[in-house]
Image (spheres, grey):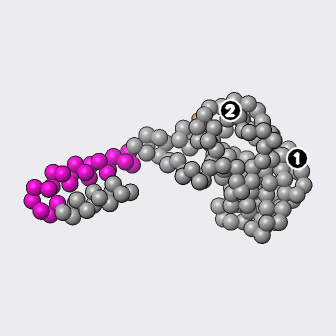
Amino acid sequence: MTGVRSAARVLRQAALPGRAAVAMALFALAACNPLMKMRHGGVERPAATEFGLGPRASAGGTYVASLESTQPLKLRRMQTVELVVRNAHGAPVEDASIFVDGGMPEHGHGLPTAPRVTKRLGEGAYQVEGVKFNMGGWWELKFLITSAAGTDSVTFNLDL
Ligand SMILES: [Cu+2]
């Protein structure tokens, strides 16, 4: 953003004769940025702090969820993870129905498998089977959670 800001400053100074060419060049540079993002699927990779197994708040703040795995998540291997769901007050959510989705935003493709919740483990924990990541990079693993508290989605950003 500092690049855009300094370009704007130069544009203001461009009212002075002789600076217009420099300003135009900088403006063209700034205009390239959105195009560069589009080449990567029109999405910007989230900040490093947005990655990890949680706890993550759901989009609407209804839930806080964590991903737990007995082993670190690995590439190209079918694995089972646990999703622990709590409400905004920290109480475990026992009776949720959960739909799993995800993919690689930069590549524009979804998950190679169809993971699903196969067991309610109690204390707000749900067993999710069939999780697989078939290439390295930034993955999103999304859970659409519905309970008496409402429907909300939580997205984990994973770097594999
Ligand atoms: Cu990919």
Label 1 residue SS: strand
**Residue 154 is one of the magenta-drawn residues:** no
Q: Position of residue 151 (x, y in %)?
A: 73, 61
Residue furthest out toward the left: 17
Label 2 residue SS: loop
Residue at 47% across, 46% down: 42
Residue furthest out toward the top: 76
Q: Position of residue 120 (x, y in %)?
A: 88, 51
For the residues labelled 1 and 2, the Cα–Cα distance comes to: 24 Å
Please say if 127 is above or below 107.
Answer: below
Q: Residues within 10 Å of mark 1 (few under 14, many from 20)?
A: few
Q: Position of residue 101 (x, y in %)?
A: 69, 46
Q: Is residue 99 visible?
A: no
Q: Are marks 1 and 2 in contact (CB under 8 Å)?
A: no
Q: Position of residue 143 (x, y in %)?
A: 72, 51
Residue at 68% across, 32% down: 75
Assign the N terminus to one quadrant of the image: bottom left
Residue at 29% across, 58% down: 6
Task: Determine the quadrant in which ligand 1 lies.
Answer: top right
Residue 39 lies left or right of residue 119; in this view the side is left
Q: Which residue is mark 1?
A: 119
Q: Earlier in the sequence, mark 1 or mark 2?
A: 2
Residue at 62% across, 32% down: 135
Which SS does the magenta portion mostly show?
Answer: helix
- Label at residue 48: none
Residue toward you, 107 or 89: 89
Q: Which residue is mark 2?
A: 75
Start-end of magenta stretch: 14-35
